[in-house]
Image: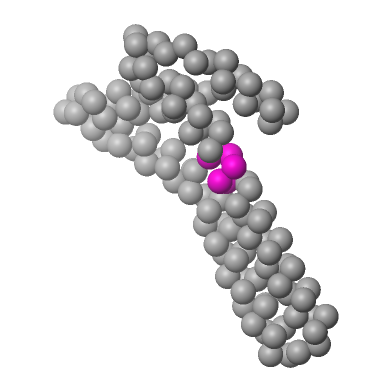
Amino acid sequence: MKSMMLFQILDATQANPESACRGFDFVIRIIKNGLFPILQIGIPIILIVLGTLDLGKAVISSDDKAVKEAQSKLIKRCIYAILVFFIVTLINLLFTMVGNIAGDSAPGLEDWSNCWNSID
């Protein structure tokens, strides 16, 4: 399914200068549909797996101090994973808010918001 989405992204190489993105459709599509899902899903999974492996090593070694350190690392990594997961949502919210706040006073920002929201 991911490979099909990647091919759909790559098939959309035709830049449309009439769109709100002014020819940056392909770059925005790569960021929104390629880079952000990897960041949003891949990095949290890696962080949690690494924390679990550290905790498993500490449990196998039977060292109480190492287990406590690994538990604290796992908790920190889980918190970081949650933060990384919500970065994409925060960026989308930020771009939408900037476009709405700018309104007619800054047409370039409104165009950027329209560009960001129109790319799927």
**Quarter of the image where one finds residue 24:** top left
Name which residue lies at 67% across and 77% down.
Answer: 71
Position in image of residue 39 (x %, y %):
56, 46
Kindly identify the residue that appears in the image at 56 percent across and 33 percent down.
34
Q: Is residue 82 visible?
A: yes
User: Viewed as shown, does residue 46 lie left or right of 85?
Assistant: right
Specify how the rendered protein is coloured.
Answer: one colour
The x, y position of residue 95, in whole percent, is 36, 36
Looking at the rendered image, the quarter that the N terminus falls into is: top right
In this view, which residue lies farthest toward the left? 105
From the viewer's perspective, is 117 left or right of 109? right
* Secondary structure predominantly adopted by residues drawn in magenta: helix
Residue 94, x across and y down, in percent: 37, 41
Pick whichever, 7 or 48, lies toward us. Answer: 7
**Image location of residue 99, percent across then percent down:** 30, 31
Q: Residue at x 64, y 25 (%)?
A: 5
Q: Which residues are magenta?
A: 36-40
**Foreground: 106 or 62?**
62
For the residue pair 15 and 116, the one nearer the viewer reads as 15
Residue at 73% over, 67% down: 52
Q: Is residue 20 in view? A: no
Q: Is 57 or 75 nearer to us in this picture? A: 57
Query: How many labels were placed on the picture?
Result: 0
- Give the vertical position of 70 relative to 92 (above or below): below
Is residue 3 shown left or right of residue 111?
right
Residue 70 located left or right of residue 107: right
- Any magenta on residue 16? no
Residue 38 in magenta stretch: yes
